[in-house]
Amino acid sequence: MNSIANSAFAFLFAASVAFADDAALDKRVMDLAAELRCLVCQNQSLAESNAGLAVDLRNQIREQLARGASEREVIDFMVARYGDFVLYRPPLKASTFFLWFGPFVLLIAGICVLIGRIRRQGAMNRQLSEAERLRADQLLKE
């Protein structure tokens, strides 16, 4: 009877260790998936997305981490396969220059256009000279 209790205890202990390992692996997978962009949704991370490709990529991350790959190795694998677009924080390099600075360039261009329109509109709203006012009154009376 004692050996059965010991066996049951050993089984439960092994199951709880395996469950704890799975929970730790799940946390690592979801933390890493939160750093990667879903290639289908594009505005969601792999952790948030329910797209088929996102599920497959999360499973790929899980398999690689379970085999002992580091987070860096998994990220490098994803970048090699899908490019820097898969990263929510792509590195600053020539190919990602517009990702980093494009929004600022567009903002500055928009501000310049807005200032130009305001100046043009201000020039149009200038006061009429007395001769122009008389001419306008004359035209309105006709």
Image: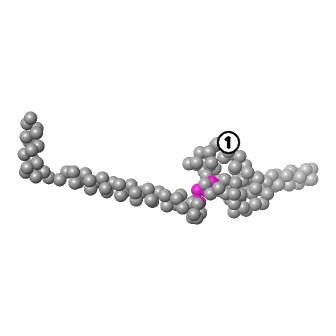
The answer to whether residue 71 is above or below residue 42 is below
User: Percent x, y for residue 10?
Assistant: 86, 55
For badge 1, the amino acid type reads: Gly
Report which residue position mark 1 lands on. Answer: 52
Colour scheme of the picture: one colour
Q: Nearer the viewer, residue 94 or 51?
A: 94
Looking at the picture, tell me which residue is in the foreground, 68 or 40: 40
- Compared across the picture, whether 92 is left or right of 131 comes to right
Task: Mark yes or no: residue 133 visible.
Answer: yes
Disc 1 on helix, strand or loop?
helix
Please state the horizontal and vertical placement of residue 124, each as a whole percent of the image.
Answer: 21, 51
Residue 81 percent location from the top left of the image? 70, 54
Which of these two is toward me, 89 or 6? 89
Q: Is residue 5 left or right of residue 128?
A: right
Q: Which residue is pictured at 62% across the width and 57% down the height?
A: 84
Identity of the residue drawn at 70% across and 49% down:
57
Assign the C terminus to one quadrant of the image. top left
Q: Is residue 110 left or right of residue 41?
A: left
Main SS, magenta region, reads loop
- Is residue 88 magenta-colored? yes
Q: Position of residue 46 (x, y in %)?
A: 63, 50
Other-residue count near label 1 (Cα within 10 Å), few / some / many at <14 / 14–19 / ≥20: few
Q: Is residue 137 left or right of residue 26?
A: left
Residue 23 image-quadrant placement: bottom right
Residue range in magenta is 86-90
Instruction: Classify residue 70 by image quadrant.
Output: bottom right
Q: Residue at x 10, y 38 (%)?
A: 140
From where the camera sits, is residue 9 visible?
Answer: no
Q: Residue 122, located in which quarter of the rendered image? A: bottom left
Residue 23 included in the magenta stretch of the image: no
Image position of 139 with respect to 109: above or below: above
